[in-house]
Amino acid sequence: MTLRFSAGRNGLLAATCVAALAFAVPASAHDGIDHSKPAEIRADSHAPIGVMGDHMHKEGEIMFSYRYKRMDMSDVRDGTDDLSNAEVLATPNRFFGNPGQPPRLRIIPTEMVMDMHMLGAMYAPNDYLTLMVMGMYMKKEMDHITFNPAGTTQIGGFTTVTEGFGDTRISGLVRILDDNNAKVHLNIGVSLPTGSIKEEDTILTPLGTTANVRLPYPMQLGSGTVDILPGVTYSDRTGDISWGAQAMATLRSGRNSEEYKLGNIAEATTWAAYQFAPWISTSVRLKAESIGKVSGQDARIMGPVQTADPSNIGGRFLEAGLGVNLVGQDGFIRGHRLAIEASMPVVQDLNGPQMKRDWTLTAGWQYAF
């Protein structure tokens, strides 16, 4: 397993380090007036940046946020077993019997990179309800190797790319408990199908020709369905230590216009953080996730590649993450938050041959007023 950090991500990490220095040094008064020290803002009052809908706001507060998330996947696994190219090529092709379809898989995905840009806003009309909306723009790239119709001779490679807006989430956070430091709220939301499910690109076929086709399910930008997003979040703290947990689900409402629906998702995460000073905290996090298979089938998604088979989607995952939260205390940076979290899989049990998750990086900015 190799971590590949591009210059852009190195720049992001460097910018975070520079910001940490700025956040650590309070703004000084130069007018000779003895200003009263403002109340401290705890860096760990927000969960790690990879957790959504983790906190509520006081009446009248507004918060804007931006998150960047990058996920890298590579190689092929079936269940908990890694597969060689020869083993993948020996896998039966679900679509054999249709015109031009060979009996076994002939195209192998080798790497997938997904970049997501998420813009969010939160508003609290009162102390018991916080409203949240989040839009997403994403880009997906998947590299492939194509083999001849029989045997294991490689004839070439190609990359497919999709880019555009994803689905939009609208949620309400409803306070259940606010007992000193212990807090519990419900997450109640919907995901609206603003992401495309008809993306196409050019592929290299086993016959050595090119064809423009509808891309498989992992390369589409949305679900095509209105999805229900129920959940519950708990947080607490004592001294410089804080912790929390969240359980969330994504429930598909039915089949989309292309006659399929993505699998339901159930996830649970727990975290703990230590505050070294009010402006900085570090965190550890575990996340368990179960993703169901696709039900139904898009009649235009077909080919001798594992990603075209709706049963080769999803699985069970356990990931571990490390994070840092920073929050400005004084001057123009007061209330501005920067955070970063990196996670890697500990366990992944996949539904049929799929690419493995390698790592995920999430970084973000938040500001409330």
Image: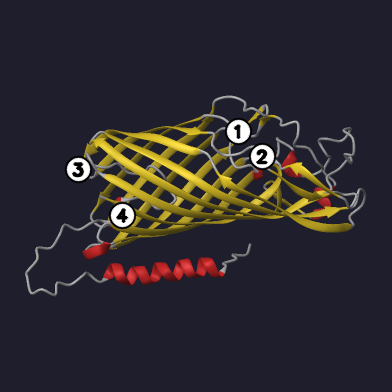
Q: Which residue is mark 1?
A: 263
Give amino acid for label 2.
Answer: Ile
Circle 4 packing at 10 Å, graded few (<14), some (14-19), many (20+), is: many
Residue drawn at x 31%, y 54% as measured from the top left? 44
Does residue 256 appear to the left or right of 160 in the view shown? left
Res. 313 mark: 2
Upstream in sequence: badge 2 or badge 1: 1
Upstream in sequence: badge 2 or badge 3: 3
Q: Which residue is mark 3?
A: 180
Query: Picture coordinates of residue 247 (x, y %)?
Result: 43, 38
Tell whether label 1 touches label 2 (CB within 8 Å).
yes
Q: Looking at the image, is mark 3 or mark 1 nearer the viewer?
A: 1
Circle 3 packing at 10 Å, graded few (<14), some (14-19), many (20+), is: few
Residue drawn at x 25%, y 50% as measured from the top left? 369
Query: Picture coordinates of residue 246 (x, y %)?
Result: 40, 41
Query: Picture coordinates of residue 130 (x, y %)?
Result: 30, 37
Residue drawn at x 35%, y 46% as measured from the top left? 244
Give amino acid for label 1.
Answer: Gly
Q: CA distance from mark 2 to mark 4?
A: 35 Å
Upstream in sequence: badge 4 or badge 3: 4
Q: CA distance from mark 4 to mark 3?
A: 16 Å
Give amino acid for label 4.
Answer: Asp
Specify the quadrant that holds the N terminus.
bottom right
Res. 44 mark: 4
